[in-house]
Image (cartoon, helix red, strand yellow):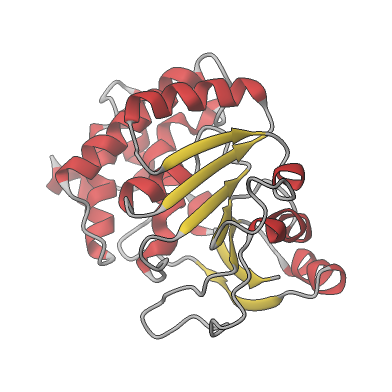
């Protein structure tokens, strides 16, 4: 079956999944693409990721965690889309990360499954999503992952979370300028850290990592004017061996230091 999938365009794969293959094919595609891009997914990590996907699909029938039309693309658009920046970049070991606007745990949970050394806080202001998220986390039992309900701009300035994190991550939940404003208070002071991505792709602490789509020129220009961040990286996320799903192909990685 894997040989057949490797030689099938993603549009055909969507049809197979839609007809009742329970996402097994896309699970194999996910692992195969990760391997092609130098990221080996262990059997326990893949099983945990599958468990998370099952929970996400189940809760999505009750709470709108992801678009209903994206269900067939869950392994590519949402899981692969959450961790693909790790093919070329990395966090330092044992780092603390806050995921702003996490919804059902994206991108934070997939990142935490791949990097189980990270301390991950998942933040969202919508209470019904947080109910789902807490239930998912209770079953996944990720020891270094927690969740907090509230607006990022308020939690980031609270005594509990202000200045406590090495990195901020976010998907397309808000304009870049807003994400910088909301994310900055969460970050520790890292005055002695070189503000550059090193040769190994390690992102310096004190960075905000954003996964976004579309033309970002206007957003970046607005952020430069209002926030004056240091832009560390801005590029398309190229995934070796991946074809189809234009939404994922168009995804961009933006890394700044506020």
In the displayed orientation, state which residue is furthest to the right. Answer: 226
**Count of residue discs:** 0
Residue 244 picture location, percent across and down: 41, 51
Q: What x and y, as percent, mark residue 88?
A: 39, 71
The residue located at (58%, 26%) in the rendering is 130
Which quadrant of the view contains residue 37?
Answer: bottom left
User: Who's the residue at 77% across and 58% down the image?
Assistant: 181
At x 40%, y 68%, the residue is: 92
Q: Residue furthest top?
A: 62
As rendered, which of 3 and 31 lies closer to the eye?
31
Name the image quarter holding residue 243.
bottom left
Task: Tell which of 148 and 233 is nearer to you.
Answer: 148
In front of the other: 116 or 128: 116
- Image quarter (top left, top right, bottom left or bottom right) of the C terminus: bottom right
**Residue 203 visible at all:** yes
Using the image, determine if residue 210 lies above or below residue 222: above
The structure residue drawn at horizontal position 42% and vertical position 36%, both measured from the top left corner, is 74
Q: Quadrant of the N terminus?
A: top left
Left or right for 134, reference 27: right
From the viewer's perspective, tell me whether residue 168 is left or right of residue 230: left
Is 252 displayed left or right of 244 in the figure?
right
Residue 15: which quarter of the image?
A: top left
Q: Residue furthest front?
A: 159
- Seen in the picture, residue 226 relative to 210 is either above or below; the reply is below
**Going by the image, does 93 lie left or right of 48?**
right
On the question of residue 107 being in view, the answer is no
Q: Position of residue 56 (x, y in %)?
A: 43, 27
Q: Residue 101 placed where, x, y %?
A: 63, 42
């Amino acid at each position: 079956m894997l040989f057949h999938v490797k030689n099938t365009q993603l549009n055909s794969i969507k049809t197979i999944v839609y007809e009742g293959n329970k996402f097994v094919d896309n699970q194999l595609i996910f692992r195969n693409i990760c391997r092609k891009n130098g990221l080996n997914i262990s059997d326990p990590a893949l099983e945990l990721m599958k468990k998370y996907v099952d929970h996400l699909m189940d809760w999505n029938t009750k709470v709108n965690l992801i678009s209903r039309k994206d269900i067939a693309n869950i392994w590519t658009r949402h899981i692969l889309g959450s961790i693909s920046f790790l093919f070329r970049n990395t966090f330092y070991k044992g780092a603390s990360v806050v995921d702003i606007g996490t919804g059902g745990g994206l991108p934070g949970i997939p990142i935490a499954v791949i990097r189980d050394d990270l301390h991950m806080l998942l933040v969202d202001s919508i209470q019904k999503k947080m109910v789902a998220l807490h239930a998912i986390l209770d079953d996944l039992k990720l020891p270094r992952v927690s969740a907090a309900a509230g607006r990022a701009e308020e939690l980031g300035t609270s005594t509990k979370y202000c200045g406590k994190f090495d990195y901020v991550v976010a998907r397309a939940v808000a304009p870049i300028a807003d994400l910088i404003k909301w994310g900055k208070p969460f970050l520790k002071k890292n005055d002695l850290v070189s503000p550059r991505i090193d040769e190994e792709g390690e992102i310096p602490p004190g960075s905000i990592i954003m996964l976004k789509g579309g033309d970002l020129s206007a957003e970046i220009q607005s952020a430069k004017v209002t926030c004056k961040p240091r832009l560390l990286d801005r590029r398309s996320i190229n995934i070796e061996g991946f074809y189809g799903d234009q939404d994922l192909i168009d995804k961009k990685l933006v890394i700044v230091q506020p």
